[in-house]
Image (spheres, rainbow, N blue to C red):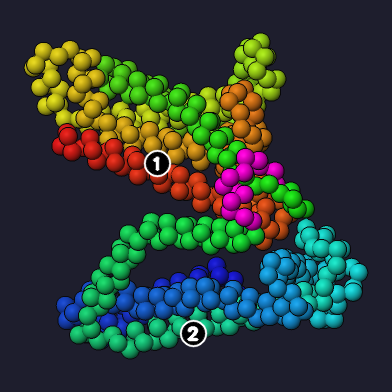
Amino acid sequence: MNIGLILLFVIGLGAIGYVLGRRRALASVSGDPRKLHSLPSQYGQSVFLYTLVPALLLLVVWLVAEPRLIDSQVRGIVAESGTSGAELDLKMADVGRISQGLGELISSSAITEEQLANMRADVDDVRGRLAEIGVAVGADIEPAVLEAAKRSRDLSGSSALLRSLLVIAAALAGMAFALRRITPEFRARNVSEAVVKALLMGSSLVAILTTVGIVLSLVFETVHFFQLYAAKDFFLSLTWNPQFRGGSDLGLWPLIWGTLYISFIALLVAVPIGLLAAIYLAEYASKRVRSIAKPLIEILAGIPTIVYGLFALITVGPMLRDYFAQPLGLGNSSSSVMTAGLVMGIMLIPFVSSLSDDIINSVPQSLRDGSYGLGATKSESIKQVILPAALPGVVGAVLLAASRAIGETMIVVMGAGASAKLSLNPFEAMTTVTVKIVSQLTGDTEFASPETLVAFALGLTLFVFTLGLNVLALYIVRKYREQYE
């Protein structure tokens, strides 16, 4: 039974428990709810919770522990053949793919369980059958790898059956326990409120735990990468040339340069236009103009990035090439830093404009009145009073736009190309960190190879970089907020 069916079954048992608990509570007082400590529905809720929570906790623990236990047993089979280190990790990746492929072959009736049990590594059609369903393995399937894959599949099947039985048993046991506790004096309301409180606390921790999980996953895989590839070469090399057959040069700086260059051009377009539009809408535009212009600007934020990418590829890129790059002798490609930067800047305008508009409108009217009372004009009030007071929020809007620019992928792929280089020419094709993260993690590649694991090192580097931007922005926000509070 798969996870979805287990969840549906447990929720169904919880619903049955709710009805039974409510009826049992009313039956214990001969149908008079005034004699109950809590509402009848709260007795039903307590049974529902006792049915659901233990079963779900068991399911979560099982899903966390199961892969590690199976991996430890299967890894031992491969390790007995004398394999260790990075080679062992590569073979374990083969084990995972072969195990999944064997399961798909059986589910499609391409082979039977008996044929699987009799398979040996010298059977010529094993690799061919796996290739037919898109599972790529090496030229030779070693006996230990095939046996480990079969063992992994057997353990996974047994674990799934045992998991289903234990989770359902836990749900039934929780329901029986809750039903036995129902009496007129049972404080069902306290149980419900305690669970709701725990749910609210858990919801408040989601963002923190998610951040911790993201950082830890990046750190662990980055450490693994630096065990296979020298950190000095990664941080100091000026060449990006991944070769999945060996001899790779995985220098970071060409990707960082492309990311900063494209983001700088995008912000150079978005920040002035967006800020000026926000000032006009907040301070000069009539209500009628504002009611029309603001929604039209915000429409830009709802356009999918693939549409912006097509716009860059078909319209902006050829126009920049024909009217600027070729006449000036700066290049012949329609894919360039300028193409991606301009289109991305257009996409970022509503991020800056809409947020800045709301922030400027939130500046107290008393500051405006005081400035006008001292004889300042409208433009002087905007420059010397309103904008400084709104600066913390404007910095936040610019930071949001910068983060959006740094993390953009599709526009860069279609507008700037995929060439990793160090150049000042804005009409040359370049690429960014995010594009290379995608390219290194896609395709039929060995996950344990340095060329794949470098994506996590790139991701961690980008995370540290954006964290620094956030710290700088927070400093600016706090500094100016103290002056205007």
- For the residues marked 1 and 2, what is the alpha-carbon distance in whole angstroms? 51 Å
Residue 70 figure quarter: bottom right
Residue 238: in magenta span: yes
Q: Is residue 31 left or right of residue 470?
A: left
Which residue is tagged 2? 169
* Residue 472 in the image, given as x and y percentages of width and height: 34, 41
Residue highlighted by disc 1 = 469
Q: Residue 137: x and y, percent?
A: 79, 63
| Residue at point 85%, 81% (across, down) | 118
How many marks can you see?
2
Q: Looking at this view, is 262 or 40 the one in front?
A: 262
- Residue 295, x across and y down, in percent: 38, 27
Residue 210 against residue 94 in the figure, above or below: above
Furthest residue toward left: 373
Q: Which residues are magenta?
A: 229-242
Image quadrant containing the N terminus: bottom right
Q: Earlier in the sequence, mark 1 or mark 2?
A: 2
* Left or right, residue 337 beside residue 379: right
Left or right for 323, reference 299: right
315 is higher (above) or lower (below) than 377: below
